[in-house]
Image: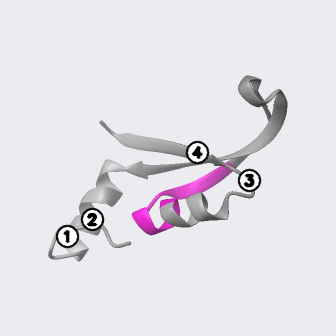
């Protein structure tokens, strides 16, 4: 697996902070995404964590645990 992708809604600052602490980067905003279960449209933030970045983060953290 080369990358892990995740997303959150704009305004969900707790989720955004967790993603940031886990090392997800390069956020992109996708506007007006249809959310059928809520019968509305919302803006999404999409981020990713590459295998290389994950491995580098593990090397920088000697215990190998994710910093949260």
Q: CA distance from mark 3 to mark 1?
A: 32 Å
**Horizontal placement of 68 versus 65: left or right?**
right
Discs 1, 4 touching: Cβ within 8 Å: no
Q: CA distance from mark 1 to mark 4?
A: 26 Å
- On residue 59, the disc is 1
Q: Residue furthest left?
A: 63
**Horizontal placement of 46 versus 39: left or right?**
left
Residue 52: image quadrant is bottom left
- On residue 56, the disc is 2
Q: Secondary structure at mark 3?
A: loop
Q: CA distance from mark 3 to mark 4?
A: 9 Å
Of callouts 2 and 4, which one flags the residue occurring earlier in the amino acid sequence? 4
Residue 67 location (% of width, % of height): 33, 73
Q: Residue at x 80, y 40 (%)?
A: 42
Residue that numbered label 3 is attached to? 10
**Residue 30 in view here:** no
Residue stretch rendered in magenta on the structure: 19-28
User: Callout 2: 10 Å neighbours few (<14), some, many (20+)?
Assistant: few
Residue that numbered label 4 is attached to? 7
Q: Residue at x 39, y 42 (%)?
A: 3
Q: Can you say which quadrant of the picture contains the C terminus?
A: bottom left
Q: CA distance from mark 2 to mark 1?
A: 5 Å
Q: Residue at x 31, y 49 (%)?
A: 51
Q: CA distance from mark 2 to mark 4?
A: 22 Å
Residue 47 location (% of width, % of height): 55, 50
Q: Secondary structure at mark 4?
A: strand
Residue 19 location (% of width, % of height): 50, 59
Give the label, 2 or 4, closer to the camera: 4
Residue 59 location (% of width, % of height): 19, 70
């Amino acid at each position: 697996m080369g990358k892990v992708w995740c997303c959150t809604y704009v305004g969900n600052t707790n989720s955004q902070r967790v993603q940031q602490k886990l090392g997800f980067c390069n956020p992109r905003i996708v506007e007006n995404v249809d959310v059928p279960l809520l019968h509305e449209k919302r803006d999404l933030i999409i981020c990713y964590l590459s295998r290389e970045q994950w491995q580098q983060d593990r090397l920088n953290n000697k215990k190998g645990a994710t910093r949260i």
